[in-house]
Image: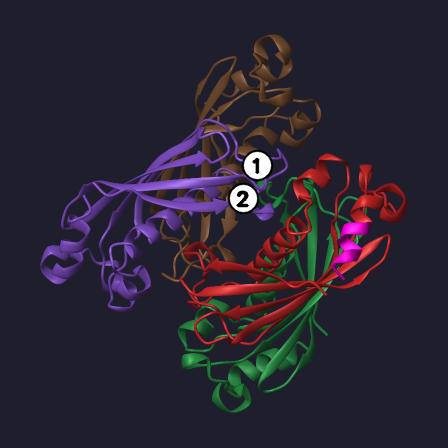
Chain colours: A brown, B purple, C red, D green
Amino acid sequence: MYINETKLKVRYVETDKMGIVHHSNYYAWFEVGRGEFVSNSGMSYRALEDRGLMMPLVESHCKYYEGAKYEDEVTIRTWVQELSGVKVVFNYEVIRDSDKKLLAKGDTVQTFVGNEFKIVNIKKKYPDVWEKLESLC
Amino acid sequence: MYINETKLKVRYVETDKMGIVHHSNYYAWFEVGRGEFVSNSGMSYRALEDRGLMMPLVESHCKYYEGAKYEDEVTIRTWVQELSGVKVVFNYEVIRDSDKKLLAKGDTVQTFVGNEFKIVNIKKKYPDVWEKLESLC
Amino acid sequence: MYINETKLKVRYVETDKMGIVHHSNYYAWFEVGRGEFVSNSGMSYRALEDRGLMMPLVESHCKYYEGAKYEDEVTIRTWVQELSGVKVVFNYEVIRDSDKKLLAKGDTVQTFVGNEFKIVNIKKKYPDVWEKLESLC
Amino acid sequence: MYINETKLKVRYVETDKMGIVHHSNYYAWFEVGRGEFVSNSGMSYRALEDRGLMMPLVESHCKYYEGAKYEDEVTIRTWVQELSGVKVVFNYEVIRDSDKKLLAKGDTVQTFVGNEFKIVNIKKKYPDVWEKLESLC
């Protein structure tokens, strides 16, 4: 199973008045991890969208253990927990680099859709994408 | 059980290149609903923070049924699913006003914390807050 | 000259670790004001985009006098400073409702573009839009 | 004169329904550049805030030449245009790495403030900060 690791540094704009990263930004980080995961399979998520394949979320979930702070350096670990022709479930961990503490973990469910958000089966419609994603599971 | 209803209009900045609202923004909307819920109990979340009480999230979750679009008018329904002295679970629904379609639903878990993010029991430390929240469950 | 007034309440997610609204969010507020300005002319910015007309920014500018805080209620005043067939300059003021203090003011320059971001002259291509916008100047 | 160069990759969440990066995000990028500029002087902006020194914006400005797209790799060039004891003016350029095209340029004005957002003169109150910043102009 392939696990992608992406490094980020907390941006000021991501903090809120509690002095920690606003919880909604972890989902943006997961998305960065997901994009890098796809990139490292030799595809590009942007290129997939140009071919008409989109992956909107149908579910997202996150548990927060400790708030990341401005300028913290973190690693986003991303892997595929489950894959079928019509959907994929990604898992994520956010780890603070300085002490390897797990700050948050989460998961998202994406469906594969084409024009007008109609579900497509990538095994049939995008077999090359299916093969690459499956090889990483 | 009290259910708060807050109306919002989708902002351009909330959309992404798929042409729909980016999934992370639903969590910001839930937060607006939560703030209004607290306001309508006669308290203000800002005033609570000024008294040293914060409510950071320890978990968040959302299911997406259909993407909201720019200028859509939506209603955020917010209620308390579970309340104890140290945490509260809120539930949310996002409904599109034009056709009453449920676009998303979610839940968040908050703990009550004081200085340095130490958990506090609001039954003991903030009994007025406890009473007001409990009266809405 | 028509001046649109839109009311907003500061969201938690808009604050940063200084405890005030992050400066980038004023641009999102200007955009809300701009959208309402267009709506109140009897058009809808979303409908204009559906007809192929977009208004990307080519310049933005803001002066900040005092930071808005969480739950502040503010009014965004929006008007057209300058209009030609190919561009429009909007002006904005952000006023705190409680004491009528001017918190920020700014301006944005938009060009009118069609497919592939090519500039179009709305006097010729969208004369109804031109007429409505001009009537508000 | 020191010019900091920071590399970023466009995030999906930063795009809007026009398919390009929402204009407000350039200000978040400028902020990343500014933070890296300060870091590379041997200080940390986070550490400065911990010492009671904040640098809120009093003005921001940006010109947009071409929209950055999802997954574009860009370089943020940051330098100090003007420095006094009470304020600093930063300049920025956003350059697309693939073809070295200038996508945007901007500037921000920051004042130095302490508790309760009162202006402080860093020459007197934080001479070490003054020296380091001045050495980079």
**From which residue to which does the magenta span run?**
C131-137
Instruction: Tell me which amino acid carries mark 2.
Output: Val
Q: Is C53 placed above or below C137 here?
A: above
Q: Position of residue C134 (x, y in %)?
A: 80, 56
Dominant secondary-structure state across the stretch colored magenta: helix
What label does residue B37 carry, if any?
A: none
Of residues C24 and D121, the one drawn nearer to the viewer in this rendering? C24
- Report the side of A78 relative to D77 (left or right): left
- The image shows a total of numbered marks equal to 2
Mark 1 or mark 2: name the one nearer the start of the chain.
2
Q: Quadrant of residue C52?
A: top right
Instruction: Tell me which amino acid carries mark 1.
Output: Lys
- How many other residues sit within 10 Å of disc 1, few (<14), some (14-19) or many (≥20)? many
Q: Quadrant of residue C18?
A: bottom left
Q: Is residue C61 in sight in this rendering?
A: no
Check disc 1 and report the residue beneath it: B69
Which subunit holds the residue at mark 1? Answer: B
Residue under disc 1 on the same chain as residue under disc 2: yes
Of residues B51 and C88, the one drawn nearer to the viewer in this rendering? C88
Q: Is residue B6 in sight in this rendering?
A: yes
Q: Which residue lies at the image location 60% right of the left edge and 25% below the top edge?
A: A54
Q: Position of residue C50 (x, y in %)?
A: 71, 35
Tag 1 near tag 2, CB within 8 Å: yes
Q: Which residue lies at the image location 22% right of the left edge and 54% below the top edge?
A: B112
Reply yes or no: does residue C134 show up in magenta: yes
Q: Is A104 placed above or below B56 here?
A: above
